[in-house]
Image (spheres, helix red, strand yellow):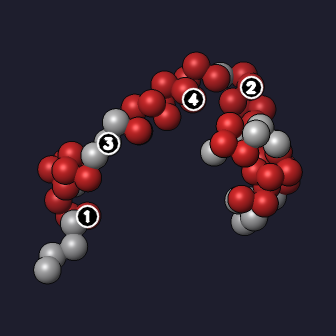
Amino acid sequence: MYESLDREPARLREAFHWLTEAQVRAALAYYGAYPEEIDRRIAADEQWTPDELRARYPALVRSR
């Protein structure tokens, strides 16, 4: 999200209005300290498909 907002903390704060400024700063500081860890996690999360989600966590699927 941060990159899609041109790496502007103010825009990130607007997008996540429920977070305090301190929380946004903490998140950005964490990313600054551990970018590889965060990028790996984001890449892994982006691999999920709806079918995989249903297969792994069937209780999350609404029954019709």
**Contact, CB < 8 Å: mark 2 with mark 1?**
no
Q: Are marks 4 and 3 in contact (CB under 8 Å)?
A: no
Packing grade of label 4 (10 A; few <14, some 14-19, many >=20) is some
Query: Which is nearer the eye, 27 or 2?
Result: 2
Q: CA distance from mark 4 to mark 1?
A: 25 Å
In the rendered structure, find residue 32 and report the number of the disc placed on it. Answer: 2
Among the two numbered marks 4 and 2 on one chain, the one whose residue lies closer to the N terminus: 2
Q: Which residue is under mark 1?
A: 60
Judged by depth in the image, the label closer to the viewer, 2 or 3, is 3
Residue 13, percent from left and from top: 79, 55
Mark 4 → mark 2, Cα distance in angstroms: 10 Å
- Name the residue type under label 2: Gly
Amino acid type indicated by mark 4: Ile
The residue carrying mark 3 is 48
Quadrant in which residue 30 is drawn: top right
Circles 4 and 1: CB atoms closer than 8 Å: no
Residue depicted at 65% across the width and 22% down the height: 34
Q: Quadrant of the N terminus?
A: top right
Residue 12 appears in the picture as rendered = yes
